[in-house]
Image: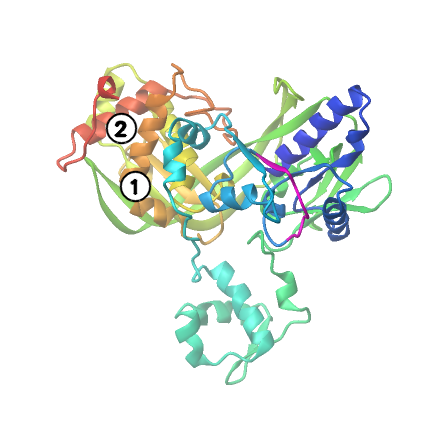
């Protein structure tokens, strides 16, 4: 459950209860990362003692918090992994008491796939967590914490990997470690205290309430431009605030309380460059690669969406700095023959690729232990780094990569098979949030050609020299 969704559910619930003059309106709260520690402890205590009837929460309440006795867990959307689903369902019914767990399927590919194929969920075991310990951004934090405890010897590369020396050299240049036969910690702070268990983005943004000057909450630096841009609606404990100013240099967002009839959704533009493949393999009549890329994204505007109805009220343009980071990606090309047949049949090549990209990203969490927010995608009708062929890229949303794209590369055939099934099984004609539309799309889901995406995958695999079972739509 996304932070914004948790806040919106709380606000909607409170509004309904208040309209009915129910005293229960004061007995529900929201809980998520970004709240001040003392706020979270207060909510936990009230939930434990029964002072609260319910809490709308993100995964922040999933582990490590004793919340007492609850009667029911309502999961608004598939949590992203089988492990998280069972963990969240198990938050209710402690002490051998009966409980109820309900999963509400949202209108996105992975939720609708599970609604139509429930045995897939019940027959699967919990996933194995994916992590890449050689990621330089993660390794740097490990090394700082290790050096604080005890100087690191060169022989310890057997524990940290050969990349240890490159990362230590960068830390030494930054003045965080020094070398005197061993690598000594040279900082001033407690390094473990600077490591976030929820983000790899490092320093976060403080959210300051202008009227009182008090700290309202915090936000990950990686998400700051999307959630704290000027004009953004920041939701906190069911109340709405508007971002008046974003001080990028000092990592501060200034907000003012405002009772607004809308919330905001950012629009981003993303491009992929500096494509460097590590390895590749055949994919049907084409090829798939895994390697390193540079992702450049920019928040270019936002949409004001009316509460409850989600109707778009206004689009506002923005001009924020570009953000770029190296990461890992999996990408595949569409064969020229397939592209020619696609265009010849009147399908839109850009819209077909875009639809395929959305559907594949939407279903990927079934194959890699990740959240939809952990991954991103780009499609291009003629990408210069793929011999000007049409291509789809799926990349790790964390700098350096954490292994998600590599997992997608390993299971690319199964991923695309599920992608095709999601699109074919959805009863809509032109594409909808249940199959090819994405709430994260920076282009407002334009263009999209669902029929073209289905044709593209069918054609690729029907012309594959390898044996790959693909039935006609009449057999599905």
Which secondary structure is most common in the magenta stretch? loop
Q: Nearer the viewer, residue 153 or 433?
A: 433
Residue 73, relative to residue 249: is it above or below?
Answer: above
The image quadrant where one finds the N terminus is top right
The answer to whether residue 67 is magenta is yes
Can residue 244 be seen here? yes
Q: Which residue is mark 2?
A: 457
| Circle 2/circle 1 CB separation < 8 Å | no
Q: Secondary structure at mark 1?
A: helix
User: In the rendering, which numbered label is found on residue 412?
Assistant: 1
Image: magenta residue range: 65-74
Q: Nearer the viewer, residue 152 or 302?
A: 152
The image quadrant where one finds the C terminus is top left
Q: Is residue 243 left or right of residue 467?
A: right
Q: Nearer the viewer, residue 363 or 241?
A: 363
Can residue 378 be seen here? no
Image quadrant in which you'd find residue 384: top left
Q: Tell me where residue 258 appears, x and y as whole percent.
A: 79, 29
Q: Residue at x 14, y 38 (%)?
A: 466
Instruction: Point out the tag, 2 or 1, that comes first from the N-terminus.
Output: 1
Q: Residue at x 22, y 23 (%)?
A: 340
């Amino acid at each position: 459950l996304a932070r914004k969704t948790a806040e919106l559910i709380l606000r909607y619930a409170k509004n309904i209860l208040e309209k009915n003059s129910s005293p229960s309106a004061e007995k529900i709260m929201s809980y998520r990362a970004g709240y001040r520690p003392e706020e979270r402890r207060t909510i936990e205590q009230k939930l434990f003692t029964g002072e609260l009837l319910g809490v709308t929460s993100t995964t922040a309440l999933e582990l490590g918090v004793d919340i007492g006795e609850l009667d029911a867990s309502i999961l608004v959307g598939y949590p992203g992994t089988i492990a998280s689903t069972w963990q969240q369902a198990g938050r209710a019914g402690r002490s051998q008491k009966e409980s109820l767990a309900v999963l509400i399927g949202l209108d996105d590919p992975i939720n609708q796939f599970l609604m139509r194929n429930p045995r897939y969920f019940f027959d699967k075991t919990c996933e194995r967590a994916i992590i890449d310990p050689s990621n330089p951004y993660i390794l740097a934090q490990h090394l700082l914490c290790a050096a604080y405890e005890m100087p690191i010897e060169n022989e310890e590369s057997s524990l940290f990997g050969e990349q240890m020396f490159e990362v230590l050299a960068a830390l030494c240049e930054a003045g965080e470690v020094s070398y005197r036969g061993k690598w000594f910690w040279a900082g001033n702070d407690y390094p473990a205290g600077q490591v976030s268990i929820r983000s790899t983005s490092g320093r976060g943004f403080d959210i300051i309430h202008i009227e009182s000057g008090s700290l309202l909450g915090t936000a990950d630096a990686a998400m700051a431009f999307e959630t704290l841009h000027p004009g953004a609606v920041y939701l906190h404990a069911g109340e709405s605030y508007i971002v008046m100013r974003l001080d990028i240099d000092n990592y501060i967002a200034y907000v003012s309380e405002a009772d607004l009839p809308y919330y905001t959704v950012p629009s981003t533009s993303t491009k992929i460059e500096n494509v460097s493949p590590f390895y590749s393999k055949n994919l049907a009549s084409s090829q798939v690669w895994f390697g390193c890329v540079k992702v450049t994204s920019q928040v270019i505007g936002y949409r004001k969406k009316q509460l409850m109805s989600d109707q778009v009220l206004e689009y506002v343009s923005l001009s924020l700095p570009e953000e770029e980071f190296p990461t890992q990606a999996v990408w595949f090309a569409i064969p020229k023959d397939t592209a020619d047949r696609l265009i010849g049949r009147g399908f839109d090549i850009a819209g077909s690729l875009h639809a395929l990209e959305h559907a594949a990203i939407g279903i990927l969490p079934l194959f890699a232990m990740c959240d939809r927010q952990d991954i991103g995608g780009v499609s291009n009708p003629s990408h210069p780094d793929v011999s000007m062929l049409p291509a789809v890229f799926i990349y790790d949303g964390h700098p350096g990569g954490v292994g998600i794209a590599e997992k997608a590369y390993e299971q690319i055939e199964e991923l695309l098979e599920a992608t095709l099934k999601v699109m074919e099984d959805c009863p809509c004609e032109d594409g909808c949030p249940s199959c090819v539309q994405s709430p994260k799309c920076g282009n407002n889901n334009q263009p999209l050609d669902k029929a073209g995406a289905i044709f593209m995958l069918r054609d690729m695999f029907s012309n594959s020299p390898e044996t790959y079972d693909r039935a006609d739509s009449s057999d599905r």
